[in-house]
């Protein structure tokens, strides 16, 4: 179902299917993603549950952090967000052939500092280049808990804090989620 026809990329994708644990194809290699701790794992789960309820009512698919999405970018061939919403073609037992409409990336212990900030900005740029409409950067240790990025204004995220309702327009139309639920 993938539109990727480069033999080297096809080999990497085949290797990704055999990789144990969460991983992405970045810069021509498979990059393993470390397991996460309680707070980020719980936040990702809450986002997934909220998206799942939305998808049951309005359509689309809510995907957990183990689902891989293929991308056809020069430096990136896949994504594996912590939670996501997807309306593209189905793929059965295969990786989804295109990136999600919405991706939530929840920060873990190693997602802090200048290097991590650069990597997250680069990944957001990749998401937008691949067609993702909205990316959440969720930081359960910050007052600015949810930063909502969009391709037209990638340096000006909407920011949501405790007590507020976060959104993912236009990727998930009409969906909102209480920021406080990220801590339950």
Image (cartoon, rainbow, N blue to C red):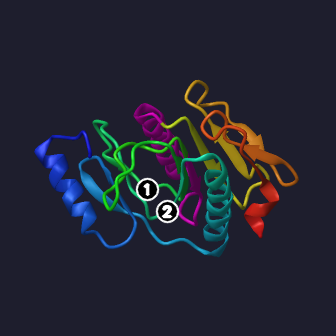
Magenta-colored span:
103-131
Q: Is residue 174 left or right of residue 170?
A: right
Where is residue 159, by image quadrant?
top right
Q: Is residue 89 left or right of residue 52?
A: left
Quickly name the residue at label 1.
Answer: 80
Number of numbered discs visible in the structure rendering? 2
Label 1: how many Cα within 10 Å (few below 14, some 14–19, many 20+): many
Q: Residue at x 16, y 40 (%)?
A: 5
> In terms of sequence position, does the residue under pointer 1 or pointer 2 come before the other?
2
Where is residue 80, by image quadrant?
bottom left
Where is residue 109, by image quadrant?
bottom right
Q: Nearer the viewer, residue 151 or 133?
A: 133
| Callout 2 secondary element | loop
Q: Residue at x 32, y 62 (%)?
A: 93
Q: Position of residue 28 (x, y in %)?
A: 23, 49
Q: Position of residue 86 (x, y in %)?
A: 50, 47
- Determine the residue located farthest toward the top in the rendered image: 152
Q: Position of residue 81 (x, y in %)?
A: 49, 55
Label 2: how many Cα within 10 Å (few below 14, some 14–19, many 20+): some
Q: In the image, which disc is placed on residue 155?
A: none
Q: Position of residue 32 (x, y in %)?
A: 36, 64
Q: Nearer the viewer, residue 21 or 32?
A: 21
Distance Cα–Cα, label 1 vs label 2: 6 Å
Q: Nearer the viewer, residue 122 or 181?
A: 181
Q: State yes or no: residue 112 in magenta.
A: yes
State yes or no: discs 1 and 2 in contact (Cβ < 8 Å).
yes
Q: State yes or no: residue 158 in magenta.
A: no
Quickly name the residue at label 2.
Answer: 65
Q: Is residue 167 above or below residue 162?
A: above
- Determine the residue located farthest toward the left in the rendered image: 7
Q: Is residue 152 above or below residue 23?
A: above
């Amino acid at each position: 179902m993938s539109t990727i026809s480069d033999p080297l990329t096809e080999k990497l994708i085949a290797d990704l299917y055999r990789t144990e644990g969460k991983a992405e194809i970045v810069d021509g290699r498979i990059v393993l993603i470390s397991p996460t701790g309680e707070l980020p794992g719980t936040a990702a789960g809450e986002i997934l549950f909220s998206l799942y309820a939305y998808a049951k009512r309005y359509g689309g698919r809510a995907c957990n952090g183990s689902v891989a999405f293929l991308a056809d970018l020069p430096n990136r061939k896949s994504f594996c967000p912590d939670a996501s919403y997807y309306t593209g073609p189905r793929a059965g037992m295969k990786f989804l052939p295109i990136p999600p409409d919405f991706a939530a990336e929840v920060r873990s212990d190693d997602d802090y500092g200048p290097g991590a900030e650069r990597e997250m900005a680069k990944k957001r740029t990749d998401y937008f280049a691949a067609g993702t409409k909205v990316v959440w950067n969720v930081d359960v240790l910050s007052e600015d808990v949810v930063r909502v990025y969009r391709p037209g204004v990638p340096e000006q995220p909407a920011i949501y804090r405790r007590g507020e309702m976060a959104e993912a327009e236009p990727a998930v139309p009409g969906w909102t989620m209480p920021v406080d639920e990220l801590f339950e």
